Image (tube, rainbow, N blue to C red):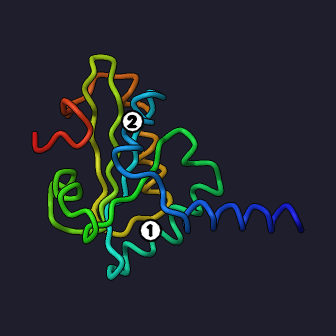
């Protein structure tokens, strides 16, 4: 039982503590050449809290977030960054950027509360995008509206 308890404590610590800032996560993803997964939400948003407190920790517990750098952006606390990353105004948004060999980033997103399966599929597509030509890319993660 102590292994399960340790895992629960580790999971809670991972998501209770503030994840790296967007800029720190972007730098880490660039250094590691791995996708950047960004959850944009707000404290007052029930769907955002479900994503932050249930869906993402469950994925982390299963190891599904290992191939990505994950961070969150609080829409109210960092509105400028959130607006730069978002293509529509609804939250929660889960955005993934995959680094491509030419220095551009492939971008995909989920809008609204998403299931673990939907997030896992998004991560899988991001990993595939790194290996194939993108249909949609931008010059930098969060590079704005293309």
Q: Position of residue 37 (x, y in %)?
A: 40, 47
**Can you name the residue that lies furthest to the left here?**
146
Horizontal placement of 81 versus 53: left or right? left
Secondary structure, mark 1, is helix
Residues at marks 2 and 1, CA–CA distance in whole angstroms: 24 Å
Location of residue 27 (image quadrant): top left
Image quadrant where one finds the N terminus = bottom right
Q: How many marks?
A: 2
Horizontal placement of 80 versus 63: left or right? left
Q: Position of residue 34 (x, y in %)?
A: 45, 32
Against 138, is 91 above or below?
below
- On residue 138, the disc is none
Against 29, is 16 above or below?
below
Image quadrant where one finds the C terminus = top left
Against 102, is 41 above or below?
below
Of residue 44 and residue 18, the one placed in the foreground of this image is 18
- On residue 51, the disc is 1
Of residue 49 and residue 118, the one placed in the foreground of this image is 49
Write the residue at 23% across / 58% down: 82
Write the residue at 47% across / 43% down: 69
Q: Position of residue 28 (x, y in %)?
A: 45, 36
Disc nearer the start of the sequence (2/1): 2
Write the residue at 49% across / 50% down: 120
Secondary structure, mark 2, is helix
Write the residue at 48% across / 56% down: 19
Q: Are marks 2 and 1 in contact (CB under 8 Å)?
A: no
Q: Residues within 10 Å of mark 2 (few under 14, many from 20)?
A: some
Residue bearing the label numbered 2: 27
Horizontal placement of 126 versus 19: left or right? left
Q: Residues within 10 Å of mark 1 (few under 14, many from 20)?
A: many
**In front: mark 2 or mark 1?**
2
């Amino acid at each position: 039982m102590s292994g399960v308890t340790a895992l629960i404590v580790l999971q809670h610590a991972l998501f209770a503590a503030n994840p790296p800032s967007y800029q720190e996560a972007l730098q880490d993803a660039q250094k590691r050449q791995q996708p950047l997964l960004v959850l944009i939400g707000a404290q007052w948003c029930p769907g955002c809290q479900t994503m932050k407190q249930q869906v993402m920790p469950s994925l982390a517990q299963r190891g599904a977030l290992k191939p990505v750098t994950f961070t969150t952006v609080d829409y109210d606390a960092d509105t400028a960054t959130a607006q730069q990353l978002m293509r529509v105004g609804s939250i929660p948004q889960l955005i993934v950027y995959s680094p491509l060999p030419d220095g551009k980033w492939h971008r995909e997103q989920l809008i609204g509360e998403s299931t673990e399966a939907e997030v896992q599929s998004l991560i899988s597509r991001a990993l595939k995008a790194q290996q194939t030509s993108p249909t949609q890319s931008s010059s930098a993660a969060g590079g704005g509206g293309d």
